[in-house]
Amino acid sequence: MCVDNCEAQWSTDPTQNKVLYSGVVNLKICTDGTGGAFVAFQDSGPNLYFSRVDRNGVHTLVQPTQFPLNFDAQLLQDIVYVGNGEALILYTDAVFDPNFFTFEHQVFVNKIDTSGSLLWGNGVNVTTNTNEKFPEAHFVYDREGGCYVGYTQTQNPTGLDFLDAYVQRLDSSGNKLLGNTGLKLNVINSEGSVSSIDINDKLDVYVGMGLYTMRVDSLGLAWGQELPINGHISDNGLFEFFSEFIGQQKLLKVRKYDENGNLSWGGNEVLIDTVYDSQHNGYFGFLKAYSGGNDIWYGKTPPNSNSEGRNQVIRSNGSLQYSFGGISLINTSLQSKSGVPFPTLSLSKLYTFGSDQDSTITGIERYVQKVDKQGNLQWQPIGNVITTRKIQGLYSLTNDLSGGGIMAWYEDPASGSTLRIQQISRNGNLGEVLPLTGDLNNDSSIDSTDSQMILDFITGNIQLNQNQLESADTDGDTKITVNDASNIRRLEAGEIHILPVYFYNSN
């Protein structure tokens, strides 16, 4: 495993993105809270590590921190920022059972910080029994320095019993808050497999188990519904996206459930698009947007056999911002060319798409596009190229907390599975480091001085330049109001852990 020149900053050349390590087979990144990124990854061992790159692109940890191997094989699941320069990492650790020739997986969580420390030692073992079927778990930040973890386990290591689905909550010190065994979820059906977990601003937790959804609040299990989490969860309910055939057409629809699990919109469904017809097999996928917003991105295959990204905004009353079918995410002149799949990853107001193989556009290119809060494209006509390197297919994207993003990926194993990372600014420029959202005086501190500058601007006492105006928009509504100053005060008070607030649920 090799490292780069640690003092080197972000690359401005999409053909020469910053190198971190080689021999990487899995990775996840999240913000470090200061405009840089925590990078979690594993080698072919498989052993799990994490490192950090600061907002200027400097690799601050010369050697990555390795996680203790409790058993035989680790598998990285997810990473999430929890404030105060700390992040949580979810992973499984497995022990090989020679009697049944299987791996028995157990779920762990550990907390890391910017110094490279593992704050929870060997990690917290969430599971109390083994799970040999699914080495998979999901977690979400609980807004108080801890997390909710959704996972499955079985009472019988031979795998003959049905799997049980559980949720556990860990506090900021790693203590279990839902008993040692956690809260059993599949109390109605006989078998459960946790497929997703999410939380809204009211701190209601939604756990998806295939086609079944449970809502958990501070008192425990609230209700269960036979519906999947495959859309966006808002503060006042759950949006369910689904499709159904009518004749030769497959229609994409959405319906909404309130926080009590009852259908909203008078029980009606909203038709969004046609995703299949008799001429061509189509498909669609969903990407979560930002807190408080109900934007969805989906892809479909038009008759020219090339994937096309579409964007639609669904309002809380069920109305659509755009007409039936939404708007295209790419320039129409490129829809006749190959190698332009629909977006596969979303982050607040950024998404990435493009070709990882030679195509008829210009070769291997990965684009990033920016979308405003109203769902409009900002970097016309197709976005900006972030890399021309050949991505193996697994990559991760986080926010640079200045309106731009940071993407990490690893390349073809034939070239050494090299892990690379690249920042792109809110202006669409590679390696351009701009003031953080909320940091109007650019002193690397977001405090009362910045909130007072916003108030002085509103009252006409001072003028702000363009960079300051963009930094002052802490809620992403493109307007400067007292709410933007209030968000900074909330950040100082610890009520929120990150700006901009539309990124709060999209870490």
Image (cartoon, helix red, strand yellow):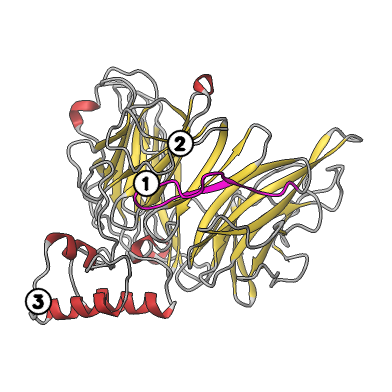
Amino acid type shown at disc 1: Gly
Q: Earlier in the sequence, mark 1 or mark 2?
A: 2
Residue 494 higher or lower than 45, as above or below: below
Q: Which mark is residue 57?
A: 1
Identified at 39% across, 21% down, the residue is: 357
Q: Determine which quarter of the picture holds residue 12.
A: top left
* Other residues around mark 2 within 10 Å, as few (<14) / some (14–19) / many (≥20): some
Bin the neighbour count of mark 3 within 10 Å (Cα to Cα): few under 14, some 14-19, many 20 and up.
few
Residue identifier under label 3:
462
Q: Position of residue 355 (x, y in %)?
A: 36, 26
Name the residue that disc number 2 marks.
4
Which SS does the magenta portion mostly show? loop
**247 or 104, which is in the foreground?**
104
Amino acid at dot 2 = Asp
Please tell me whether mark 3 or mark 2 is closer to you in this view. 2
Viewer-side residue, 97 vs 375: 97
The quadrant of the image that shows the C terminus is bottom left
Foreground label between 1 and 2: 2
Looking at the rendering, the stretch of residues picked out in magenta corresponds to: 50-69
